[in-house]
Image (cartoon, grey):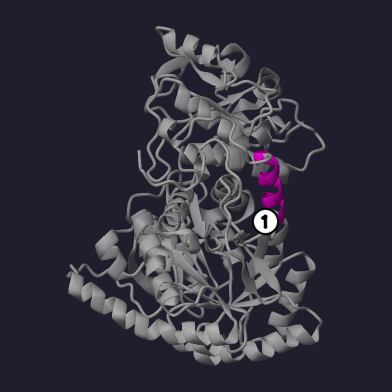
Amino acid sequence: MSRLIYAPHPYGSPRRRTREVRVGNVGVGGDNPVRVQSMLTSDTRDTETCVRETLELAAVGCEIVRITAQTRQIAANLEHIVAGIRRAGCDVPIVADIHFKPDAAMEAAKWVDKVRVNPGNYADKKKFAIREYTDAEYAGELARIEEEFAPLVDLCQARGVAMRIGTNHGSLSDRIMNRYGDTPLGMVESALEFARIARQRGYHDFVFSMKASNPKVMIEAYRLLVARLDAEGPDWNYPIHLGVTEAGDGEDGRIKSAIGIGSLLADGIGDTVRVSLTEDAVHEIPVARALVETVAGLVGDGKAIDSSGWEAATWDPFSYARRKTARLTIQGIPLGGEETVRVFTSQSKWDAVAHKLDRLGDYQPEIVVESAGVIAIDPRDQAAIDRINAAPEPSVVTVADGLDLPVIAAFRLLASRLEARHPLLLKDTLDPVPNPQADFLTSLLRASANIGSLICDGIGDAVLIQGESAPGQSLRLAYNILQASGARIFKTDYVACPSCGRTLFNLQTTTQKIRAATGHLKGVRIAVMGCIVNGPGEMADADFGYVGGAPGKINLYVGKEPVKFNIPEDEAVERLIDLIREHGRWFDAPPRPAEALVDA
């Protein structure tokens, strides 16, 4: 168990106390609510469109708007964009998003309220070069970075401009990769190097972010960051921006975002959030606001439900390892041990879909909870815990319904008190009576945050969705949460970035075309990237990549290696299919069922 601590208590924590950083007229951190932000998809050179999109975002509740600035010349147009926004009577803060170009950052800082820099590519490089750095060489690299970064710090300090030091898992520099690897530790160290430069110059108006497309990596990186900040001292209490980058679109993008962002909000971490969807930016805001509100309802007053602390916790929050349980067979289905995480359902839902199991595809109910012999207890009931632990045979155990406990804290406590041999059945809610009129988005966000958080902690051998009344929809939600959390890969996995001004093709239509062509390839991971900022890094986690290389031209990747260049966009999807076929991962799609699943 790591000696680092990222939250006061494993079984319920209040929101982390941070200093306030002003971004224009909006306060981030301190006593302010969790702020919601988004990013323009428009070309930064198109002043009129950028102004219009910013006003549309502000109208739906976006509190901070980010705009890409690829070059100094493009960054100069921020003057006209900001002026147009202000003439329209809108005072939403504007953030310049910088990658690669220090001179673009220096220009942007003249006009905006905040500058986002990525330590992985600001005055640094990523060519996947393998090199051993001596301590002296490493120090020399840091001195070079300080020389490039310090002028921006000084300018931001002089103008009262805030900053986000935003590490991306997909764009760690070669220097960091060679010393720390492609790890959460490398992400944290990359950000801290820049923060130390800022602090040495007396500048403190910055926030941190640790974004990744993999929720497990993202969660671990943020936890490690907060633990390191706390260990540095009380004046390292900088606000935290949360986001899962390249989350994708539709239900999958919402689930992946809710797992990563929701898990951290539930632990009291996070002062501002962005839900990154491969959709029009205005669609991100209702999801982000609903996620913040939903998680606030999940954690209650944030008080710990048990007096025991981290010394009693049996899971390591900084390194994923699945809880080691015994293997059982229930209703003919193996569960626990090394088996995949199983999907339970109620008898009534089973009965509702029993006549069309052949049309459910991969979303099959596996075990009926009422006849599975599951033991439901209050995790605070030590006598009940002792009885189960004393039994010679392992049992499937869950938290009893009707308890007024936060789900995440309750199952963590159960996992810590119960002998590891007993498999656990996770639930999305302890209220088993769903409201048929409830908004599905709320059900999705609650289930994803609660179950996804526990799965990413390594806790859970089976899941049961109780908060969604529609039988088929509840099954689909269960499976998609397991897919997004990496617990059960049963379909094609997509890493798709949100569109922005850097994007070199229409991400939304292209992503849908790729989904339509490849959605039957179970277990294949495909990345769809609008440009090269995070593309090459995220390719390392994908089997195949489709990346914008130039306007109208696509580069294709296998893993992190580019293998085909400058393919015309109208040919690129077919060439991607050819590439998948060349590597033996292609098979033809099976015939589609005649009747689609429709919930009663």
Q: Is residue 550 left or right of residue 288?
A: left
Q: Is residue 222 left or right of residue 87?
A: left
* Frontmost residue, 528 versus 295: 295
* Frontmost residue, 138 versus 568: 138
Q: Residue at x 39, y 61 (%)?
A: 187
Q: Position of residue 570 (x, y in %)?
A: 52, 71
Q: Which residue sits furthest top?
A: 392
* Frontmost residue, 513 versus 221: 221
* Frontmost residue, 63 versus 18: 18
Q: Quadrant of residue 374?
A: top right
Q: Is residue 414 magenta?
A: no
Point out the image quarter for the C terminus: top right
Q: Quadrant of residue 317?
A: top left
Instruction: Write the start and end of the magenta stretch as one range.
Output: 288-299
User: Mark 1 highlights which residue?
Assistant: 288
Q: Position of residue 555 (x, y in %)?
A: 41, 71
Whether residue 591 is visible, yes or no, is no
Q: How many marks?
A: 1
Q: Position of residue 57 (x, y in %)?
A: 73, 69
Task: Specify the principal SS of the magenta part.
Answer: helix
Q: Residue at x 59, y 31 (%)?
A: 305
Q: Is residue 290 magenta?
A: yes
Q: Amino acid at mark 1?
A: Ala
Is residue 522 placed above or below 403 in the rendered structure?
below
Is residue 191 placed above or below 53 in the rendered structure?
above
Q: Position of residue 465 (x, y in %)?
A: 63, 31
